[in-house]
Amino acid sequence: MLLLGLTLLLTAAAAADLPDTGAPPLLGPGLGFSPSVSASASAPPLLLLPQPRPEYGAPGVALARSAAEEPAVPAEEEEGPHHHHGGGYRVVQWEWSYVQTPYIIAIWLLVASVAKILFHFSQRFTTVVPESCMLILLGLVLGGVVLIANKKQLYQLEPALFFLFLLPTIVGDAGYFMPARLFFDNLGAILTYAVVGTLWNAFCTGFCLYAAKLLGVIDERVQADLMDFLLFGALISAVDPVAVLAVFEEVHVNDTLFIIVFGESLVNDAVTVVLYKVYISFVEVGVENVQTADYFKGVASFLIVSIGGTLVGLVFAVILGFITRFTKKVRIIEPLFVFLMVYLAYLTAELFSLSAILSMTFCGIGANKYVEANISQKSRTTVKYTMKTLASIAETIIFIFLGISAVDKSKWAWDTGLVSCTLVFIFVFRAAGVIGQTWVLNRFRLVPLDKIDQVVMSYGGLRGAVAFALVVLLDGEQVKAKDYFVATTIVVVFFTVMFQGLTIKPLVDWLKVPRSTSRKPTINEEIHERAFDHILTAVEDIAGLQGYHHWRDKWEQFDKNYLSKLLLRKSVYRKSELWEAYQKINIRDAISVIDQGGNVLTSARLSLPSMASRASFPEVTNVTNYLRENGSGVCLDLQVIDNVPGAKVEEDTETHHVLAENLYKPRRRYQSHYSRHFMPLGEKERQDREVFQRNMKSRMETFKSTRHKRHKKERSLKKRRGSDAKEDGSDKPRRNVSWQDKNPVVVPVESEEEKGEHSDPEKEEDVGITFVARKAETPKQRPKSVPAALDGSPLASPSSPPSGDSHLPWKGSVGSPPPCVSVEANKIIPVDLQQAWNQSISSLESISSPPVPAEPVHPRVSALSRLGGPRPASYTPPGSTAGSTSSIGAQVLQGPFCFPERNKKEEEEEEEEGGAVQEMQPLMSSLRPPGNPCVYLRSLVMAPSPGSGEPHSRGPTQL
Amino acid sequence: MGSSNSSVNNIPNAQELMQETGFSAAHILRLHERFEFLDKHKCGQLRLVDRPTNQPQDFGAVQELALNPIGDSIISAFFSPGQETVDFASFVRILAHFRPTDRNQSRDGAQQEPANSSIRKLKFAFQMYDQDRDGKISRAELLQVLRAMLGIQVTEEQLQSIAERAIQEADLDRDDAISFDEFRKSLEKVDIDHKMSIRFLR
């Protein structure tokens, strides 16, 4: 329904231009699209509306026309002279001409996208029918609708649009994400098939068609001589990257097979371009005028086009790598550089009429390694998704427009002989070429291509939009049989994409072609495969062979010594690929653990997917290492990772990132503080709750296990800060200060890490990751800053642990089930809370509380009165207080927690109750008046007093 | 071909070697030339270390090996335990590991596994790790190889954690070392025939 509506809309839109669409679409001579380029750059790039272009500058004309053709729309302006600025004031104006181009483009994109959605509604259907087939069918339907509505086909796949916009997006995606190692491992085969195979196909098809013509199989009406047929053979023989990608992506044949077919389809562009241009020029000057020298020029042209295109691509790859080296401060436009440079590589090659596809492919392949290393993780994701989105939509549009283009009466110059001969010939010669070349190649190949591979390769020789665009580009004056060629090309494309595309999957199943596994390599495989490479290189050296591995090793040395130094940031240059792989695996584990559902996290045992069936971890592994290794699942408590002594910062932050993103949503306040892009705190409340519960839980665990009063004080202090951290809104200045005031006192162990993060900005450029990590770290700082502060105070207990390690709550709970969110942690009932509070208060009352220093009132209370905000100021080290606040607070907190007997009671309580109690402690300590603290507290809880009292009592309930 | 055959005849046990390793006569000849080039002392044996001087071994003549991060480990894998020399037959046998597996050509499975079977290839790689030949890749041995391969690029701690992870991943019986079986299992998804073959030795 929606589609139909859209179609109607499009038809209506197209109708606006009906009077002008008599002329055939723009045709650039040869491959020089430049004239049509400049034209279409200013004009609608998507739909070629050939004639309106001249009058495009005068919106009034088109406006009037469209208004006249749209009866449904209230025609505000009846005629051209009434420009939208002319005449009286109109309440509603019909500005069709103003929005026409982008509007139609957007509508088409929408149609294409919606079509994709619809196809994927039926799972079973899409597994059988490739998407490309469905899109072509849809295009046929849409074309039919347009044709019926307008008696004339308005849309077709325009060569300029195709070559300048649609094809680059697909090739760019393909090139950039090309598995480089696989590509170069099979480079020999790819080049052979691309060059020899395409030449073979082109010549054989051309000559045989000519022979068929002579034999009378092809009708007399097809006015074509040898050159025309050779030209046609050249453009029809090239395997099409778009079609191959579309079909093979759904088939999932093994990597080698895929890379050979796909690589061929990319690389053969050079051959096609040259053949096409050579033949065009031959046709233009006439065969009889062609001199021998011209043939050599053709060969030279091939070399220039292919090598030149490759070089252009590589130059742009180097430039791109070099640019991304310096984008540290402008992360946000990193992806743009990638797109621009890759696209520029394409355009530049096109500018010099070199092989644009080769250029773009090699730019992508060449730059990928350096760019991916240089840009941030987020940019990487952006590049990936944008490229995939663009490529996907371009592919969709290509196939839809192929379908639409077919429904055009003017194109149907049908000749059965030509069509059937072409179909037979391209299929036969493709198969023959593949078999012949494979036979030769297998004498050299390490892994021979067996018969099944050859069948799939022959069958996978799909023709597509490139052939169509090329044939449409032909000059009807020069090539008399152009209409026949166009019709034949359409049939060939449809046959290969639809019939072969439809049947290749069953064929692959039936032949039991080895499929690709999307399995990611384990760390062992990463290590050993690298070792294998070294072994093979060494063995080649020992045996005195200068083989593939020898040269690859030479290249790697060169890359390491020069290229990487030039193109990689210093910080990245130090990293090793294996280390990266290791981190990736860790992150993948983390993500998959999380994807399995949060439930995994609540169980003490979790199995990591890449560590198949491991019931428990070896004892020899020390715990911190274990936690670090597995990064994710077990240690819900982010602080665990941070406290691995000397753990590398990048690793931590990486893991943090994953954890922070997935385990619970941390507050991003620090992030917003530092990054240029403020992240709205959508889930703040939930996060606060969750963070609090986590902290409470882990604190309870420690409480049970250690029972050290010092710890409790610290914890409570920490919690106080934690709560202030979480409840303090997006008040930046305050946040900033409160964070800083935790900073000055740091234990040496940590300071190293801190240094790592702060003093090495090169290392940590990813703003997002950094601050997630920093923020997650803040809880860790608290306990550390406290003992430091306490040491200075006379009340400092001698038993305070020397390093930050042993008194940390997560350390205590490591032996027991790791800290995790229990299910009941999520349900908080205010009534329970009230009870808990009462209990805890009564327990507090039973304690003889030690004398309270006189200090407590001042900084906090005064700050509270000063701020007077809804947020409990007692929770917040106010903005005005300097770093000393924390130490004062710490001293203050010494008081009330010297009661060991309370432990038992707390243990009996629910964890959130315990949390509530603990939550109370800083409250009590900081707000306690010089009199009886408990009474004051009780009154505070029971009867929330106006002002500061209310927020306090609400605080826990919010949790 | 005739000339090469005649030369092959000068090499002792050439026929047996060809039979055993599957190398062609041309290969044997070529390898022999290489062997003689490496064998500076013309004693028919390559030495691990020159005894009298403790000077660079014969393999030191291969410049590129010096650049190979794990070159030493690979060289020592050429020498059977306790031995400090390798003669031509062993040299060829070692290299035979890297001959591509012929898939179509059915070797009669009567005799023992050919040197270029994937299991033998793996064995070679395993020995490269397992320097002390105790049948297990210990953590230290893995670390040593990793250190050589990664060099200065990563810190010792990162090496530790990679090794740790690798051992955890592969170590099925939890003896904190990788036995050959475990090694094989950890690589069973990898196309060893492909990854451990050299095209020129076909």
Image (cartoon, grey):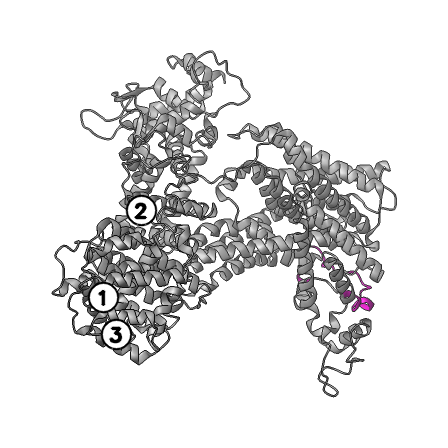
Name above or below for residue A165 compared with residue A556.
below
Residue A328 visible (yes or no): no
Decide which of tag 1 and tag 3 comes sooner along the chain.
1
Do the residues indicated by labels 3 and 2 lie within the same chain of the protein? Answer: no
Disc 2 crowd rating (10 Å Cα; few below 14, some 14-19, many 20+) is: some
* Visible residue check, residue A735: yes
Q: Which mark is residue A860?
A: 3
**Mark 3 neighbour density, 10 Å: few (under 14) some (14–19) many (20 or more):** many
Q: Which residue is mark 1?
A: A744
Tag nearer the camera, 1 or 3: 3
Q: Which residue in the protein does label 2 denote?
A: B154
Q: CA distance from mark 3 to mark 2?
A: 47 Å
**Residue A477 magenta:** no
Looking at this view, name the residue that lies furthest to the bottom: A88
Q: Contact (CB < 8 A) between labels 2 and 1?
A: no
Residue B158 placement (x, y as % from top left): 31, 45
Q: Quadrant of the image for the N terminus of chain A?
A: bottom right
Secondary structure of the residue carrying numbered label 1: loop
Q: Residue at x 78, y 68 (%)?
A: A17
Chain under label 2?
B
Left or right of A361 on screen, residue A805: left
| Residue A62: quarter of image | bottom right
Badge 3 sits on which subunit?
Answer: A
> Looking at the picture, how far across and down is residue B196, in whole percent?
43, 30
Mark 1 vs mark 3: tell me if same chain: yes
User: What residue range appears in magenta?
Assistant: A14-36
